Amino acid sequence: MIPPPDGVQHAPMRFETRAVHAGGEPDPATGAIAPPLHLSTTFEHGPAGEPHAAGHIYIRESNPTQSRLEDALAQIEGGETALAFGSGVGAGAACLQALDPGSHVLFHRDLYYAFRTMALEYLPRWGMEASFVDMTDLGALRAALRPSTRLVWTESPTNPMMQVLDLRAIAGEAKRAGSLLLVDGTFATPALQRPLELGADVVLHSTTKYLGGHSDVHGGALVFRARGDLAAKAAHNRHILGAVASPFASWMVLRGLRTLACRMERQSANALAVARALEGHPGIAEVHYPGLPSHPGHTVAAGQMSAFGAMMSLRTRGGREGAVRAASRVRLFRNATSLGGVESLLEHRRSVESADSTTPDDLIRVSIGLEHPDDLAEDLRQALEER
Ligand code: PLP
């Protein structure tokens, strides 16, 4: 972070300010305000491998643009250290592979489907055990924790059911059981929710989504409360197994961070307006959006998020057929996977998830962008009409 020019100790800067400036020190070589994009794969070292003063040796280990992004991510999440990856799932895999064989990982039942597949298909191959529990029920969580549980894995809000988990309470349970807590914060972003401040140990992001913000960069990140064993092992996994972020992707995500606070504020306001407009629509059985007082997690969300985000899911009437029909009729929304860009997208999730998907057949996942909310609500209303 930029040192105060007068050397006087100031109050910690607010999120919006940190998001604009973190990792943004002017380039010492040229004074450039925009961060330089260093594409070099290798860095000169001494004859016995002595690294250059900047510390970089080879791109798979670290590079200056990625380091700037990591510095920025640690600052805006309030962590001691961060690692950038080539994808969100790459970040998750590096974290899971940092656990010892014999570890048990406890996942919330509703989670991003590739992590469910990773739990079921890969954890046993890596000598670990996975199980799933509904963490909206703290008693069930307590009962599912084992002496061998090393990591509790949550998302909030969840993809795609939009469940809200009480992160403070879950952090308490995990700690009592001697386990670490990871929160996939992709939907909320640090602009709206900072899990480390609520007691989590690691935050995971698919930076492909809101942090990039424009559907044009693929990346992931882990932000750690402390520079401990887990962070060191995850960094080692990234170096040896290779899920690094490219310099250009790092640069793009760093650029996205600058506007994150204002995009999240506006996109959340748009989503709330759309959710309100759709609640009670005859073509919809349920609107899952934590900003609606009817959402079972509304109060918990209000206590841990500064706004309710821009993701929602709609349970349509008429089962799978009703959902696919509505998805086929949209004019402004695009049918596409992924989320978090400035353009609104939707998707019939069950059609694109793996065979072990637990997503209901009548569900459409919606990512609300920066268009006018009335245009978005009108588009969904006409798509849902009986004709
Ligand atoms: N976590 C969540 C909540 C996601 O929605 C996604 C992707 O959609 C991921 C993680 C994985 O991220 P990536 O696609 O960048 O690997």
Image: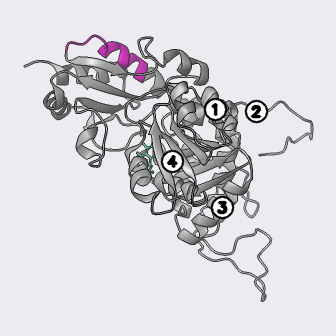
Amino acid type of the residue that numbered disc 2 sits on in the rendered structure:
Met
Q: Which quarter of the figure is the C terminus placed in?
A: top left
Q: CA distance from mark 2 to mark 4?
A: 23 Å
* Marks 1,4: beta carbons within 8 A: no
Q: Earlier in the sequence, mark 1 or mark 2?
A: 2
Q: Label 1 crowding class (10 Å Cα cut-off): few <14, some 14-19, many 20+?
A: many
Q: Label 3 crowding class (10 Å Cα cut-off): few <14, some 14-19, many 20+?
A: some
Q: Label 2 crowding class (10 Å Cα cut-off): few <14, some 14-19, many 20+?
A: few
Query: Mark 2: which secondary structure?
Result: loop
Q: Position of residue 167 (x, y in %)?
A: 59, 29
Answer left or right for 274 relative to 130: left
Label 2 belongs to which residue?
13
Amino acid type of the residue that numbered disc 3 sits on in the rendered structure:
Lys
Label 1 belongs to which residue?
173
Q: Label 4 crowding class (10 Å Cα cut-off): few <14, some 14-19, many 20+?
A: many
Which residues, given as a range, are shown in magenta?
271-282
Amino acid type of the residue that numbered disc 1 sits on in the rendered structure:
Glu
User: What residue is drawn where x is 54% and y is 32%?
Assistant: 143
Which mark's residue is nearer the viewer, 2 or 4? 4
Label 3 belongs to which residue?
233
Q: Quadrant of residue 306?
A: top right
Q: Is residue 214 visible?
A: yes
Which mark's residue is nearer the viewer, 2 or 3? 3
User: What residue is drawn where x is 45% and y is 11%?
Assistant: 293
Q: CA distance from mark 1 to mark 4?
A: 28 Å
In this view, 277 is above or below 88: above
